[in-house]
Amino acid sequence: MPDEADANRLAALPSVDRLLRSDGALRLLEEHARPAVASALRQALEVVRSELKASNGKGWRVPDEETLVAEASTLLERRAKGSLRRAINVTGVVLHTGLGRAVLAREAAAAVAAVAEGHSTLELDLESGERGSRQSHVEGALCGLTGAEAALAVNNNAAAVFLALSALARDAEVVVSRGQLVEIGGSFRVPDILQAGGARLVEVGTTNRTRIGDYRAAVTERTALLLLVHPSNYRVVGFTASPTVREVADLGRELGIPVMEDLGSGALVDLSAHGLAPEPVVRDSVEAGADLVCFSGDKLLGGPQAGLMVGRRELVRRCAAHPLARAVRCDKMTLAALAATLRLYEDGTATERVPTLAALLRRPDDLLRQARRLASALRRQGWSVQVVPGASQVGGGSLPGEDLPTTLVSLDPAPLSAEDLARRLRLGNPPVLCRLHKERVLLDPRTLPREEERHLLAAFR
Ligand SMILES: *Cc1c(COP(=O)(O)O)cnc(C)c1O
């Protein structure tokens, strides 16, 4: 009976206590505390037990003590390094959600460290010595940069949209174009978030064409909001039509119904002026008459994870006063990073100093130079590499279909397979994330700061 055989094999496994007395464990105990070593050994045994179960006993042998201790040692090393670590991104995706989206500006990272290491003025009005509002650190800048009357920062844009729907449209109808019922990154679907916010979805138009008359016809006395959603991560092309923000805003004003726009990325500067495809700018939506505009802090803005709401004072006030606002409020580190990032926009230095914008706007000759430098360094290490033209992506559901010309280092992984080399790079310290294409490993320098180059080269060594 296989069960009996398994039981015998399990019984043959040494106990944690016995392993702790082995020579290998004694060596580990010189460097790590006893409870940590015991826990790693327990985890190593756990792994072995689940392997036995998965294999149904076929081809499975009881590992010796040395193997178990070696496994525990790897676990201890991994734990000491921590799992959330800095990583090197040469995938060519600037806003990579898996890699933490926007990289903070140096000024923003310093502001985070400053409020993290000491007490701070988070909710203190220094003038009066009284309790102040944590929003005061960012509201002025957000209003100044977008032309809005009022602003509110919460944990992320999903929370901002959810809060707005809960505060403004609970038990009421929200009119949305069928062409804008989008899903962003799997966990954010417009119909679902409407439902969760207690609003009733009223779909208008068709997937490719919606007219202003469709919105007008859908409005009833139960309508609380006209909602526009920027279809961030895809594009409808061909026979299409949708009214402008201004047209919908004018209709809303005529009928006395607020208009909210979920902009997603929310650029604060017009990137098309720098040669990128046009992406809606928050100020333009506010100027066109949208009453409330929501966008992310860590997409094109290039700041910390946050959801920003800007718009008419009365609507922002209702959102801020809703009990959910307390549940999704930002912490001091987010606010410090956001305030410092917004200051760079106010200074007019954002395109150079906000890493997301700087990476998007890197010049082709600069990328070519960096790719060549990396290629020669890798050649000196004995790798066979080529420098080839390629494309980077914005990522983070921003500027869909917009490929940015770049120069790639294309590396022959031999004697390893491309998969194996990529895996080794991923498991290194720091982890390196690259792209694979047709059995070659591709490195895009766009998101590689100069000071990370030596770590990348060390990883290949
Ligand atoms: C990205 C995005 C969201 C979600 O924003 P998070 O900050 O990731 O929560 C919502 N709506 C749109 C249109 C988006 O592009």
Image (spheres, helix red, strand yellow):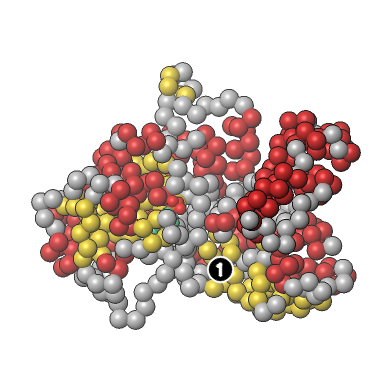
- Residue 62: percent from left, percent from top: 76, 51
- Residue 139: percent from left, percent from top: 41, 39
The amino acid marked with disc number 1 is Gln
Q: Which residue is mark 1?
A: 393
The image quarter in which residue 135 lies = top left
Residue furthest front in the image: 1
The foreground one among 48 and 13 is 13
Question: Which residue corresponds to the image point at 29% horizontal and 74% vertical from the top-left?
Answer: 208
The foreground one among 19 and 88 is 19
The image quarter in which residue 131 lies = top left
- Vertical placement of 217 versus 384: above or below? above
Asked whether residue 105 is in view, the answer is: yes
Q: Is residue 199 left or right of residue 149?
A: left
Question: Which residue corresponds to the image point at 72% horizontal and 72% vertical from the top-left?
Answer: 418
Q: Quadrant of ligand 1?
A: bottom left
- Residue 199: percent from left, percent from top: 23, 49
Q: Is residue 269 left or right of residue 241?
A: right
- Vertical placement of 97 versus 159: above or below? below
